[in-house]
């Protein structure tokens, strides 16, 4: 196989966790080729812009990118690069698995194994229609939900269930109150669900979902929901399994997909070689799945699990005294 991947090393701890991740991928001898591309502060320093055209071209050509966290400069005139990438490539599905691991600060033992599929391009996060009255006393914003946007995200969730052998999709909504927007999403979801009689489908209102997730997370398999609810729920789920150090995410569109860690560039520990590479490595697991290599994805995931179980070379955030590359080597020795 010769698959080229756009590699964005990012800012802060980004280069450190990317080195670690590529070390493990290399140990698997998958024949992957890497094409480096800059984004974020690294790109601003080198090329004078946060998201250079060359980076866009690389992602468009290779269709798959592995991306470390980027620092978005604080201040006027800089929009989030992650949001920009989502928009430019129409990365409509944000896919975040949450599975319990040994030796992490998880409250639920081994009981959590779910995936949140969040609509990534519309809903309450549309840039349009955000307004503040002239006197500054009243703010309004428009929530925009389309049948097309709802249908493709729900279909993605059901296809994911089929592909990965999962049994149930929970449609999370607030159609009882948000009758137009959430109502359209729910009705569309019901239509799609009818095409997948082999997958169980249930509906749950978002506030109840939050309580259920905390009390009985094992009842969930795949959750599909709109942008704002998905943003909040996916972080809640990351918390269920021990926090951001173990939370990967994929942004998937029709023409491109970007795999990443959910956490940021962690400037407080950058350059010290102690960042936990697991989240980006789990992003690489999602990437291998996406590339049609489910066996390799499973092997990588099992190596990560085994290393956590053995408490081998864990980084300080996991209570160990290891370092980023040492941890990566421990994982690489198990792939
Ligand atoms: P953060 O996730 O970078 O850090 C929060 C806390 O978690 C810090 O104490 C950090 O040391 C720790 N942490 C994060 N990842 C870790 C890892 N792999 N190993 C060990 N500890 C880890 O969030 P923060 O501080 O709010 O944001 C820092 C920068 O990152 C900002 O510029 C923000 O815009 C950017 N950011 C970028 C994201 C992306 O590119 N996907 C996502 C979130 C934030
Ligand atoms: Mg979020």
Image (cartoon, rainbow, N blue to C red):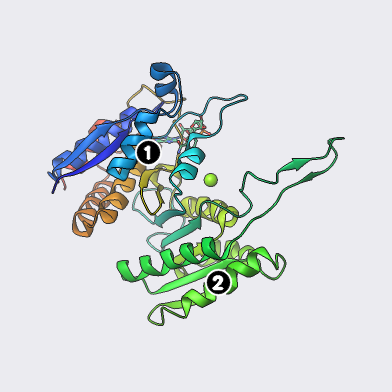
Image side of residue 233 versus residue 108, left or right:
right
38 and 334: which one is in front? 38
Classify 10 Å Cα crowding around label 2: few (below 14), some (14-19), many (20 and above).
many
**Residue at 46% across / 63% down in the picture?**
152
**Residue at 42% across / 55% down in the picture?**
95
Q: To which residue does mark 1 refer?
A: 319
92 and 54: which one is in front? 54
Secondary structure beneath disc 1?
loop
Secondary structure beneath disc 2?
helix
Q: Which mark is residue 188?
A: 2
Q: CA distance from mark 2 to mark 1?
A: 45 Å
Residue 217 shows up from this direction = no
Q: Looking at the image, is mark 2 or mark 1 nearer the viewer?
A: 2
Residue 60 image-quadrant placement: top left
Q: Pinpoint residue 132: horizontal percent, then vertical percent.
A: 78, 39
314 and 335: which one is in front? 335
Image side of residue 101 versus residue 148, left or right:
left
Q: Pinpoint residue 109: horizontal percent, then vertical percent.
A: 40, 59
Q: Pinpoint residue 225: horizontal percent, then vertical percent.
A: 54, 62
């Amino acid at each position: 196989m010769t698959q080229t991947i756009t590699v964005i090393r990012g800012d802060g701890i980004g280069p450190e966790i990317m080195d670690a991740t590529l070390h493990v991928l290399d140990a698997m001898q998958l024949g992957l080729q890497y094409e480096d591309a800059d984004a974020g502060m690294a790109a601003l320093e080198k090329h004078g812009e946060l998201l250079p055209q060359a980076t866009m071209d690389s992602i468009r050509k290779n269709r798959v990118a592995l991306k470390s966290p980027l620092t978005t400069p604080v201040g006027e005139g800089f929009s989030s690069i992650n949001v920009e990438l989502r928009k430019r490539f129409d990365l409509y599905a944000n896919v975040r698995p949450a599975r319990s691991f040994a030796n992490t600060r998880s409250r639920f033992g081994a009981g959590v194994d779910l995936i949140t599929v969040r609509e990534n391009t519309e809903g309450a996060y549309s840039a349009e229609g955000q307004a503040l009255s002239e006197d500054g006393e009243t703010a309004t914003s428009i929530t925009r939900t389309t049948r097309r946007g709802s249908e493709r995200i729900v279909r993605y969730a059901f296809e994911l269930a089929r592909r990965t052998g999962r049994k149930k999709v929970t449609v999370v909504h607030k159609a009882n109150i948000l009758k137009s927007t959430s109502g359209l999403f729910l009705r569309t979801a019901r239509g799609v669900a009818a095409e997948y009689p082999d997958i169980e489908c249930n509906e749950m209102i978002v506030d109840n979902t939050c309580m259920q997730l905390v009390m009985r997370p094992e009842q969930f398999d795949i959750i599909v929901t709109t942008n704002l609810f998905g943003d909040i729920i996916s972080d809640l789920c990351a918390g269920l399994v021990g926090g951001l150090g173990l939370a990967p995410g994929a942004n998937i569109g029709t023409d491109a997909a970007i795999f990443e860690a959910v956490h940021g560039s962690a400037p407080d520990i950058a350059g010290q070689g102690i960042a936990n590479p697991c989240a980006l490595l789990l992003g690489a697991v999602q990437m291998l799945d996406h590339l049609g290599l489910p066996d390799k994805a499973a092997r990588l995931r099992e190596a990560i699990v085994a290393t956590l179980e053995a408490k081998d070379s864990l980084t300080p955030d996991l209570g160990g005294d290891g370092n980023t590359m040492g941890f990566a080597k421990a994982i690489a020795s198990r792939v």
